[in-house]
Image (tube, helix red, strand yellow):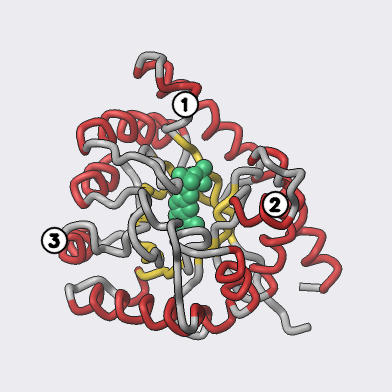
Amino acid sequence: MAEVPRPLVMGIVNITADSFSDGGRYLDRDAALAQARRLIEEGADILDLGAESTRPGAEPVSEDEELSRLIPVIEAIRAESPIPISADTMKPAVARAAVAAGASLWNDVAALRYRPDAPAAAAELGCQVVLMHMQGEPRTMQDDPRYDDVVGQVAAFLDARARAAMAAGVRRENILVDPGIGFGKTAAHNLKLLRHLDQIVALGFPVLLGVSRKRLIGELDASAKAPRDRLGGSLAAALAGARRGAAILRVHDVRQTVQALRVQAAIEGT
Ligand code: HH2
């Protein structure tokens, strides 16, 4: 097997969980900070902080609410750790505030399409930006997703969005792409994208991959209804992504993913 560099592990810090929603903001901040510390300790290379759920059917969160959830947590992490921080947001104003607070990566599931000024904002910020593929929008994207050629269409979309970003002044080396597993896709679409991830890698940008605990795993294992029961599937997908050249894996279970990657690399001698 060809030598493949081990992907970086991006740990997910959600400032959206229902269990926190009726607590005060201070509680949110503390809980998110505790999760960030745990993931750093477990070996995360990057933290991805999101304050708006993009789950199928999720309701949008206002800009003010997103800012008030996200920025204090970024500031608190930055005050105690040099770990790279990614802000998972579609809104240019939130990305701007996140970068000012210490984030170095804008993870945009809307691939800079949410507002017309998003590509220019990314260029001006000079941070890395993840362009993710999504068919439709989170509220309705799982209603009836259709493609003629899912891999070809996702690759063409990502290529077009990367060109649009570069035309607006984003530097090529700051662009990452993501096929958007679960974003307007059936299980068959997701599996095709994972099987042919090399075609996304061939675009020439580092690929970020997020499969951790997603519904796809529950569809392949009907006993794994709860997301926390999907660790085995998450690890299988992470290893498959690593073998096909993913540069960053976005995961909930950092310790287990780092361990699985380490064992795979040791076996393959990389
Ligand atoms: N998936 C989710 C959110 N952000 N960003 C990228 N680049 N790629 C992904 O696959 C991706 C993403 C899923 O989000 P959600 O369902 O809100 O939950 P969680 O953040 O716990 O994964």
Where's residue 1, x and y in %? 78, 83
Instruction: Kindly identify which numbered label has been placed on residue 198.
Output: none
Q: Which residue is mark 3?
A: 117
Q: Quadrant of the C terminus?
A: bottom right
N-terminal label among 2 and 3: 3
Where's residue 230, x and y in %? 70, 46
N-terminal label among 3 and 1: 1
SS assignment at label 1: helix
Q: Mark 3 to mark 1: distance in Å? A: 31 Å
Q: Label 3 sits on what residue type? A: Asp
Q: Which residue is mark 1?
A: 18
Q: Which residue is mark 2?
A: 257
Foreground label between 2 and 3: 3
User: Residue 186 is drawn in which quadrant?
Assistant: bottom right
Residue ranking furthest to the right: 267
Q: Nearer the viewer, residue 189 or 181?
A: 189
N-terminal label among 1 and 2: 1
Q: Label 2 sits on what residue type? A: Thr
Q: What residue is rendered at 48% in x and 69% in y?
A: 179
